[in-house]
Image (cartoon, rainbow, N blue to C red):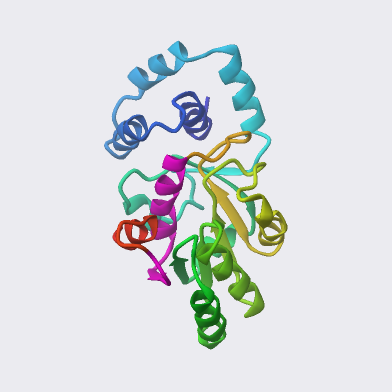
């Protein structure tokens, strides 16, 4: 098994457990013996795991050890070992601005983004495809003919919220949709917080439109 495929198997078998991902990442950085991890993986081999792994291999993905993996993303706490994607992977090499904000964003965010983005130099706009400010950011980017990256908190075959289905399809066609979660993974609350670190990790800077004091948007900005 190649290291790349081992990372995918570990990612699936451990259900994207942050502690176990960091342990393997540190072992790879330190060029440690991976035998203990291989033994642990064998313990987790089940029919369900095998089916999930087969499904995951049918989706384009990159791993922590691939040259396409963004160097900036390796520097964040708990970098994802695997990212599934649809779209133009080369966008990860371009100047990127992360835009986040409240799911209850007002017309202020939509107006501000519609006015600001056309004035920006050529760059990529990254957000999370959630309702509110995220969707506004993606829509404003597309209107301004700026490429956009959506980092979602579920599998690429899932859409949340459902009203963003057409937007997700459009971004996958002309931009890039990323997720650390394998196919058939539905959205859960903790996954939205987890994906924020990826937005921060691929962006050179993060802009917050509207956000509450204890919001995921401010968590993203603080990475």
Residue nearest the viewer, comparing 106 with 122: 106
- Return the x and y of residue 100 as percentages of the image width and height: 45, 64
Residue 153 against residue 122 in the figure, above or below? above
Residue 29 is covered by the magenta coloring: no
* 187 horizontally vs 75: left or right: right
Residue 59 against residue 87 in the figure, above or below? above
Quarter of the view holding residue 32: top left
Residue 194 is covered by the magenta coloring: yes
* 85 horizontally vs 35: left or right: right
Where does the C terminus fall, quadrant-wise?
bottom left
Task: Specify whether residue 141 is in view.
Answer: yes
- For image coordinates 65% across by 26% down, the residue present is 54
- For image coordinates 53% across by 63% down, the residue present is 134
Task: Specify whether residue 65 is in view.
Answer: no
Counting the numbered discs, the total is 0
Quarter of the view holding residue 59: top right
Give the main secondary structure of the magenta stretch: helix
Residue nearest the viewer, comparing 24 with 103: 103
- Return the x and y of residue 148 as percentages of the image width and height: 58, 66
- For image coordinates 57% across by 81% down, the residue present is 114
- Return the x and y of residue 150 as percentages of the image width and height: 56, 58
- For image coordinates 50% across by 72% down, the residue present is 106
Residue 6 against residue 131 in the figure, above or below? above
Magenta span of residues: 189-211
Quarter of the view holding residue 190: top left
* 209 horizontally vs 167: left or right: left
- Return the x and y of residue 63 as percentages of the image width and height: 49, 42
């Amino acid at each position: 098994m190649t290291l790349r495929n081992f990372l995918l198997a570990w990612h699936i078998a451990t259900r994207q457990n942050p502690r176990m991902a960091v342990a393997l990442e540190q072992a790879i950085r330190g060029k440690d013996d991976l035998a203990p991890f291989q033994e642990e993986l064998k313990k987790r081999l089940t029919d369900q795991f095998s089916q999930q792994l087969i499904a995951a291999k049918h989706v384009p993905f990159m791993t922590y050890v691939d040259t396409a993996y963004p160097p900036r993303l390796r520097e964040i706490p708990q970098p994802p070992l695997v990212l599934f994607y649809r779209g133009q992977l080369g966008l990860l090499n371009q100047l990127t601005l992360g835009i986040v904000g409240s799911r209850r964003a007002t017309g202020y965010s939509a107006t501000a983004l519609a006015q600001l983005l056309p004035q920006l130099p050529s760059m990529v706009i990254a957000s999370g495809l959630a309702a509110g400010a995220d969707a506004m950011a993606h829509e404003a980017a597309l209107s301004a003919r700026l490429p956009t990256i959506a980092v979602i908190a579920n599998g690429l075959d899932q859409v949340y919220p459902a009203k963003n289905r057409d937007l997700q399809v459009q971004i996958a066609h002309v931009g890039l949709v990323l997720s650390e979660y394998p196919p058939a993974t539905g959205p859960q609350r903790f996954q939205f917080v987890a994906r924020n670190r990826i937005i921060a990790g691929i962006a050179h800077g993060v802009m917050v439109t509207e956000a509450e004091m204890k919001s995921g948007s401010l968590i993203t900005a603080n990475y």
